[in-house]
Image (cartoon, rainbow, N blue to C red):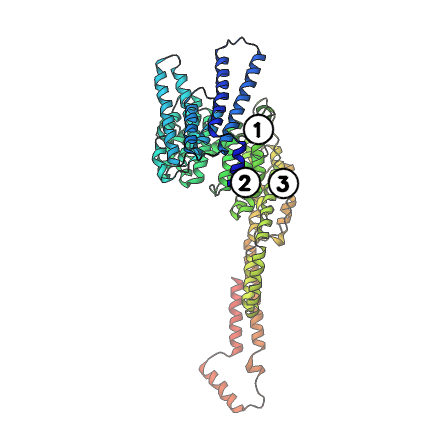
Amino acid sequence: ASERSEILGNFMPDVPALCEVVQKHLGRLVGSIRGNNNTNAVDDDDQDDDAAEFEEGEAFICLQILQLIKCSDLEEEGSRRHLVSILYGMLCSQETPDDLIEACVRTMALAHDSENQFLQTISEIVAEIKDEEVAGADDAAESNEQMALHQIRVLSILSVVLEQVSGSTSSIGLLDTFSDSIVAAVTSNNNLVREAGVSCLGKYALLTPESKVVNEFKPLLLQVASSKKEKIEVRCQAILSLCDLALLFDSVLGSSSSSDSSEETNDISFVFLLSEMLCHSNSAVVIVAAEVAAKLLFAGKLIGHPSMVAHLVVIYFDKDILESSDADDDGDPMMVKEIGNPIRLQQILSLFFPAFSIKSTEGRRMLINSIKPLLSIVNDKLAKKKKGRKTTAWPIAKMVEYVCSNVDFGEEEAAKKTGATTSSEEEKNDEANELSPIKAVEDTEDEESQVKPSSTLTASIAIAEFLSESSASCTTAYLRAICKIVGGADIILEEEPYESLFQLKKSMDEAAMVVTDNSAIRSLETLLELLDEVEDQDDLVESDVSSDMNSINEELERTNLSDPDADDADPTADEEDDGENATDVMEEGKPTNNTSVEVERRQLGELNVE
């Protein structure tokens, strides 16, 4: 390491020299920006392009020099102090471009020995910027604009700082000094300041105790996210901040009381709010909400909400959302990486569904249970057709098939993971079963009783239940498409559990009674004929009882034929003893063995009649 440092020191200038280069190019950059602001608006476009290109080049040089400073030797106290002084002036100056703020803050963090010293320096910078804000408030014409610029600069610095610090107990006191600046920005009248404040509040809340988050920050963020009057960008930023907090604190998912009387409800739930945003008319809101829902579902924070999964499936197959990206990204590949980009969301969801299915049994259960709400969501979208606008074609068959295929894929991968464990357990069980044949039979019966329904059968049950409940509200084309899906389901009766088959038969019978379209009914006939082979529960019980009675009769018959008094009697036995035994039995009035069998048969006959 020392040899590397020596070689690096021979090629790299010392820190003061690098600071001098940064100041030189920063002065050129600030001078160009200042000159452009003082020129008239009638300048030609060529000069503006030249100025923009020059400023971009100078900013790039400054950023690269700051990167070199990070790699240089910062152990020397004098060099560190000089560097801190230069960066301090850059961060306090409003003329420093925003593109350099993040690099300046990260370099400032490396120039300090401890986190507390770094936070103390940042506190002094924030205080100085606030003093300039108060001093410039005398000019009424520019006071609001200057105040907004100073607030944005403070928030830009704090946003990077909060990503750098660890939030240890020793630094909590210094972090609390930033709270007033952040909360004031959240309640500002300026949209840009408010958006930056919400983003900064989300990062700040991650470093604070859960009690303070739930009691102070969560209600504020929920109020911003649920406000219909708020700008879309600010609401999206609030929902992203709530997502980060929910991943860390489970209590954030619960409801929160709102003191704002202008709101439609005083009891706001993050989960309910997220469901609303997934159905929003603005595609940008839907995209952000979908990414948040995918994060929370994969983290296991939304267990028991299959409707969330259904919304994600609908968004994944929504062509309108993908088409909205053509007008937004302008061919810029960097825009794909930004939160809220449709292409980014498509990439996330293409990985989410199979990964969610593989992760756990609960994930596969939620996927298959999402089919019924999925059908309802698509039905509602078809019912809300706008006049003069072409109806979106929903490939409902592909959507259902996609869900089932992911469930099957998850089952296969889970079986592969548990294959080695299962095989070793089976070997142990086989050894135990050789010693205990009765236990082997019981284990086999338990395995047969635990047969799980296939994804196709479970999906068919969900579709049949939807048809029986909501077929009247479906359009003709949508109704026929759904009936075609369930009617063509490939179900093997011998491989499915009886309870699920009976449930499907019951739901299909109810659906056949309410569906009136002839084409839809014809689509259901194939499955209805197949399910006719499934016996009703009452018939199955009677069949089981009759079978049990026949078994009892056969057993009694075998008992009668194998009576030891008749078959095992010794012909050479003493006749006198037999006579005495027979006389004793007759005298006591007790029935013989044949008489007992006859009475039992008579009782069983009466049972059958009843």
Task: Single out the mark in the foreground, 1 or 2.
Answer: 1
Q: Is residue 409 above or below residue 328?
A: below
Q: Where on the picture, by quarter, is residue 139?
A: top left
**Residue 369 in the image, given as x and y percentages of width and height:** 53, 43
Asked if the residue under mark 3 is in contact with the one under mark 1, i.e. CB atoms within 8 Å, the reply is: no
Disc 3 is placed on an element classified as helix
Q: Residue at x 35, y 33 (%)?
A: 174
Q: Which mark is residue 372?
A: 2
Q: Is residue 37 visible?
A: yes
Spatial CA span between label 3 and label 2: 13 Å
Q: Which mark is residue 416?
A: none
Q: Earlier in the sequence, mark 1 or mark 2?
A: 1
Label 2 environment density (alpha carbons within 10 Å; few <14, some 14–19, many ≥20): many
Please give the residue where the numbered disc 1 appears in the rendered image.
Answer: 334
Amino acid type, mark 1: Met
Disc 2 is placed on an element classified as helix
**Residue 564 in the image, given as x and y percentages of width and height:** 55, 81
Spatial CA span between label 1 and label 2: 38 Å
Amino acid type, mark 2: Lys
Q: Is residue 548 visible?
A: no
Label 1 environment density (alpha carbons within 10 Å; few <14, some 14–19, many ≥20): few
Q: Where on the picture, by quarter, is residue 192?
A: top left
Q: Earlier in the sequence, mark 3 or mark 2?
A: 2
Please give the residue where the numbered disc 3 appears in the rendered image.
Answer: 485
Spatial CA span between label 1 and label 3: 41 Å
User: What count of labels does the image hold?
Assistant: 3
Q: Is residue 577 above or below residue 111?
A: below
**Residue 523 in the image, given as x and y percentages of width and height:** 65, 40
Task: Single out the mark in the foreground, 1 or 3.
Answer: 1
Amino acid type, mark 3: Ile
Disc 1 is placed on an element classified as helix
Asked if the residue under mark 2 is in contact with the one under mark 3, i.e. CB atoms within 8 Å, the reply is: no
